[in-house]
Image: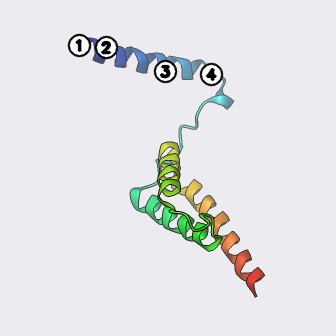
Amino acid sequence: MNLAAAVQIVAYEWRLATLEALPAETRPPSDAEPPATHAEMESYFAHLFELLDEVDFHKGKDPAIVTQRLRRLFQRTQPDARELRILRGVISDTQRLLRVKAR
């Protein structure tokens, strides 16, 4: 075993021991859902970027940088499918209210 592998094993065991020492209410849930799939994330991004276009968030500027940064942000947080449904609900309600206001 090389030094890097040994350090990984020690860090892993140290993390497990630290989590076990935490009070039960502060531990991460053991039944946590896995991160959303690639298809779910892409569907969410399409929905989000559609809303940003509807509200003219980019003000005529190229949306590429904001799009890239939002993708990185959400991929770093690794939301699960339930969390994405909540976010999509917020987007859907916002779109619905925009349509009502436009009438």
Secondary structure at badge 3 equals helix
Q: Tag 4: residue type?
A: Leu
Q: Nearer the viewer, mark 1 or mark 3?
A: 1
Q: CA distance from mark 1 to mark 3?
A: 20 Å
Asked if labels 4 and 3 touch by Cβ distance under 8 angstroms, the answer is no
Judge depth for marks 4 and 2 and give the one in front.
Answer: 2
Residue 50 placement, left or right of 11: right
Task: Tell me which numbered mark, 1 or 4, is placed earlier along the sequence.
Answer: 1
Q: Nearer the viewer, mark 1 or mark 4?
A: 1
Q: Secondary structure at mark 4?
A: loop
Q: Secondary structure at mark 1?
A: loop
Residue labelled with disc 4: 22
Taking the view exactly as shown, the residue that stands out farthest to the left is: 1
Q: Is residue 20 above or below residue 77?
A: above
- Disc 2 residue type (three-letter): Ala
Residue identifier under label 2: 6
Disc 1 packing (10 Å; few <14; some 14–19; many ≥20) = few
- Callout 1–callout 2 Cβ contact below 8 Å: yes
Sequence-first tag of 4 and 2? 2
Please give the name of the residue rendered at 29% of the width and 18% of the height, measured from the top-left corner: 5
Which residue corresponds to mark 1?
Answer: 2
Number of dots carrying numbers:
4
Q: Counting residues from the N terminus, which is met first, the one under dot 2 or under dot 3?
A: 2
Query: Which residue type does callout 3 highlight?
Result: Arg
Residue drawn at (66%, 29%) of the image: 26
Disc 1 residue type? Asn
Label 3 vs label 4, nearer the camera: 3
As measured in the structure, the alpha-carbon distance from the residue carrying label 2 to the one carrying label 3 is 14 Å
Q: What's the residue at 50%, 50% (across, down)?
A: 69
Where is residue 50 drawn, in percent x and y?
55, 71
What residue does disc 3 label? 15
Question: What is the secondary structure assignment of the residue under circle 2?
Answer: helix
